[in-house]
Amino acid sequence: MNFHIGQAHREIAIVGCGPKGLYALDSLSEAARKTPSHSFDVHVFEESPNPGAGPIYDPGQPNVLLMNFPAGKIDAWTGGRGPDLQVWLMSQGKKVAAEEYVPRAVVGQYLTWCFGQVVANAPPNLQISIHPVRVHDVRQFQARWMISPGSIVVDELLICTGHQDWCRTRRPHLSEEIPSPFPVDLALTNARIPPGTSVACKGFALTFLDTMLALTEGRGGSFAPLEQGYVYHSSGLEPQLIAPFSRTGRPMRAKVDVDRFARPQGEAYWETQLDAFEAFLSEKSSATFTSDIWPSIRQMAERTINSAPGTAAAVFTHWQGSVFDPERCRDELRTGFEIALGIRPPDVLWALGETWRRCYPHLVAWINHHDLPETDAALFRTVATEMERLAFGPPAQNIGKLICLERTGLVSLNHLDGGMAADVTVDATIPPAGSAALSQPLNGLMRDGHLSVGALQGIVVNGRAQALVNGAATPGLSIIGRATEGSVLGNDTLSRALHDLPERWAANVVHAARAGRETSLEQTA
């Protein structure tokens, strides 16, 4: 330890250091820099060899796996203290457009570099120790927290463990099941899925598309662009058939190709609409999602494309209440793809997705740390689930590649109900956000009564990321990220601008150190 007598000192642990852990460490480093009379020892626990990126943004994954977030919005720093992704890539001799969807591996390289910068430039009163292990237990120990392995005891514990799909194990009765496609270079090898085999994929969203591309383009196949799609050239190493199945069969809508899509309304229109929406949320303190916010979003969608009042409600109800058969699924994929390319005009589903996406930062501010009544929460969960498909879908090129592979026969949509007997089954879903799929150490903390769950099924935290039980903060325990989804909205984003929880958490840690020092001085006096 490198601190002076008289300094307030705190031991901190950050468990999980993907992007959320990186942002928290950076925030604490900046807070410590401004408070030289306090010292901090920070223990960073990250099993992945790439702190900052973690397993989801592993720099070693194949480049066929693309981001679902445009390059121009990726910036790991606040206040312009470091380069955003575009500037960093330019320093590496690579130029990307703001609207481009770059490989996840490239973003992982950037995040890993950012982590190195935070560590290298930490102030003298912040000492960082990196532990490349998975934490398997956390217990309260004399008003502090003991972390195993290592039996390290800390004053403040922050958990940022994110996605938990790599913690799954194979179910004994499915000997040919792959519990997660990640990391694809280990899970989807030729040995585990030999060329010519049939593959069933549980799930029909972003992780399925990653699996599909890893098993085709990732094995040496190639796509050649056409004016309205792609043609695929096989490598001969692909599976014989890749068949997704899901509970609803409803596909995701493609994100628009900004170079080809003509928006029906300009930015001035959206500025006016969103200003009115924000004013509505702030002025009506008793607003509910069911009676006020959801109708307002539907009406905004209708105005966006000049459709008749009530159209959005009818179309959404029909969409959400349907289980898609193969033909309807093909039609919907083609519709979304053609809208994305500007071949056909936007429809009400596009308008709903666009409105939700534009309103999302305001929804985040409204719903964060706001426990909804059960009826409101139930409708919000239903709408938010469908808006994941309509507002936050994949790049248009990935939907175009899916359409192409289905036409060639490498992908089949004829088994959406899961009725196909396959050589191998890949679980291409991700565990649900919130508390529904907790692994260690969160499930142990839940078991021991240190966490609680809100109406939207997320672990409840306050505005400083502290865990709450019966409205009271659990001393020294904080959580940022996917496990809090519902208490905090929109955790699955690289955006550092959407939430300020890392900065608030760091400020609270410094405040606790200051309070501890004042107490110590009083006792000494």
Image (spheres, rainbow, N blue to C red):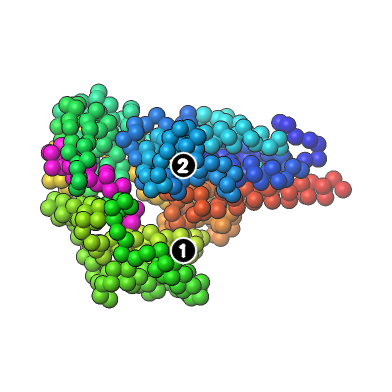
Mark pair 2, 1: CA separation: 26 Å
At x 34%, y 65%, the residue is: 265
Specify start and end residues of the magenta stretch as a single range.
Answer: 390-411
Residue 113 in view here: yes
Q: Is residue 27 above or below residue 112?
A: below
Residue 205 in view here: no
The location of residue 250, given as percent across then percent down, is 22, 54
- Decide: few, some or many residues near mark 1? Use Cα within 10 Å; few <14, some 14-19, many ≥20: some
Q: Residue furthest right?
A: 525
Q: Determine which of the numbered discs, if any, sits on residue 24 in the image.
A: none
| 2 vs 1, front mark | 2
The location of residue 78, given as percent across then percent down, is 57, 48
Asked which quadrant contains residue 165, the reply is top left
Is residue 60 shown left or right of residue 121? left
For numbered disc 1, what is the local secondary structure? helix
Asked which quadrant contains residue 14, the reply is top right
At x 40%, y 50%, the residue is: 433
Q: Is residue 287 above or below residue 205?
A: below
For numbered disc 2, what is the local secondary structure? helix
The quadrant of the image that shows the N terminus is: top right
| Residue 435 lies in the magenta stretch | no
Q: Look at label 1 and name its amino acid.
A: His
Q: Look at label 2 and name its amino acid.
A: Gln
At x 47%, y 41%, the residue is: 85
At x 58%, y 54%, the residue is: 464
For the residue pair 71 and 377, the one nearer the viewer reads as 71
Type of secondary structure dominating the magenta stretch: helix
Q: Determine which of the numbered discs, if any, sits on residue 362 in the image.
A: 1
Q: Which residue is mark 2?
A: 86
The location of residue 278, given as percent across then percent down, is 47, 69
The location of residue 245, given as percent across then percent down, is 20, 45
- Decide: few, some or many residues near mark 2? Use Cα within 10 Å; few <14, some 14-19, many ≥20: many
